[in-house]
Amino acid sequence: MATLLLKKLLSFCTTIFIVSLLIFFMFNILPGSPAQAILGIDADEQQIKILEEQLGLNQPLYVQYFDWIKGVFQGDFGESYKYRQPVTDILQDRMPVSFSLAMFSLMLTVLIGIPLGIFIAKEDGKLHSVALSILTQIGISTPSFWIGFILIWLFAVQLGLFPTHGYVPWSESFWGAVKSLFLPSLAIAIGNIAIVIRYLKNSVLDQAKQDYVRTAKVKGLSSNEIVYGHVLRNALLPVLTILGLITADTLGGSIIIENVFALQGLGSLLTTSIDSRDFPLIQSLILIISLIVIVMNFIVDLMYQVIDPRIRG
C-alpha cells in the first residue's frame, strides 16, 4: 500500500507540474501584450515598453515561469494587472463563495443522486421508475444556466422562498448563507444528480446479474440485505469515477451560474480577468481550479483502493 501511495503521489506531483507549464506558456504565447490591454489602445510604444519592464514581461518566458512558480510555492501569486493588488488577497475574498457553492452542489448530488439511483434500480420496470428515468434524461440535457433561470422564476420570484441573487457570508448568517447558495447549487447539481442516478442504476442492475447475488438469494437474504450488504459496494466503483469528473464539471458550471445569480466568486472573477488579459489572475485561477480537480481525482483513486482491495494488485 505504501508503494502504491508513493506512485500515486509521484503521478500527482508530475501532473501538477505539467499543468502549471501548460497554463503559463499557453497564455503567454498568445498574441498581444497585457501592457497594451492595461494602458489602452491610445498608449504609445514607449509607455508599453516601460510598463512591460515594470511587470517583468521583458524577461525570457522560462525566467517568468520560474519566478511565477517560485512565488506560488511561497503563497505569492503575483499582483493583478487590473485590480493593482496581490492576487492572494483577491482570491481570499472570492474563494469562500465558490468553495461553498461547489461543496453545497456536490453534497446535493450525493445526498439526492445515490438514494434515488438505488431506488430506481430496485423499482426497475415500474411506472414511477420509468417516469424518474425520463426526468433524469431531461436533467442531463438541460443546460445549468437555463435551470438557474427557471429556479429563480419559480422559487425566488413566484414563491419568494429564496433571494434572486447575491451571497450572504456564513459568518453573517448561517440560514442566510444556505438560502443564498441553495438555488445556484441546485442549478449546478440537477444535471449531475441525473448522471449519478443513471450510472448507479445501470451499475446496480449489472451487479444484480452476478453469481454472488444469486447465491445470496439462495441463502435467503432479503432484497435490502443483498443490495446494501453486497451489491452497493461493487456498484459504487463506477460512480466514484463519475463523481471525480462531476467535480470538474461543478467548477466549470459555477463560472456561468455565478454570473446568473450575481455571485462574486472565482467564476465571475475569471470571466472579468479574461476580458482584461489579467494574466497573473487568470493563471492563478486556472491553477487553483486544476489543483482542486487533480486532488479530487487523487482522493477518488485512493477510495478505489479502500472499497475494492483487488485493484491494489
Image: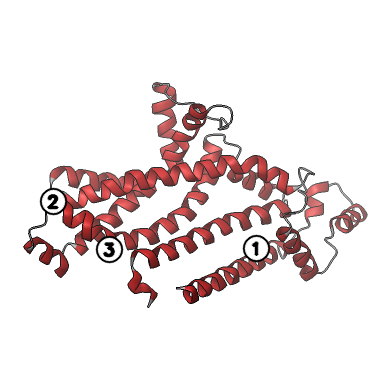
Label 2 CA crowd tier, 10 Å (few <14, some 14–19, many 20+):
few
Position in image of residue 119 (x %, y %): 21, 47
The amino acid type of the residue labelled 3 equals Asn
Alpha carbon distance from label 1 to label 2: 48 Å
Which of the numbered marks, if any, corresponds to residue 57? none
Where is mark 3, residue-wise? 234
Q: Nearer the viewer, mark 3 or mark 1?
A: 3
User: Regarding mark 3 in the picture, which secondary structure is present there?
Assistant: helix
Residue in view at x 44 percent, y 37 percent: 148
Residue 78 is left or right of residue 253, and the answer is: right
Please state the horizontal and vertical placement of residue 116, each as a whole percent of the image: 27, 46
* Circles 2 and 3: CB atoms closer than 8 Å: no
Which SS class for mark 2?
A: loop
Name the foreground residue: 92 vs 180: 92
Question: How far from the left and from the top, in percent, is residue 17?
Answer: 63, 69
Q: Nearer the viewer, residue 118 or 127?
A: 118
Disc on res. 23: 1
Vertical position of residue 264 compared to residue 212: above or below = above
Closer to viewer: mark 2 or mark 3: 3
Q: Is residue 293 visible?
A: yes
| Mark 3 Cα shell of 10 Å, populated few (<14), some (14-19), many (≥20) | some
The first of marks 1 and 2 along the sequence is 1
Q: Residue at x 20, y 52 (%)?
A: 121
For marks 3 and 1 on the same chain, the one whose residue lies earlier in the sequence? 1
Residue where numbered disc 2 is placed? 125
Q: Residue type at mark 2: give it.
A: Gly
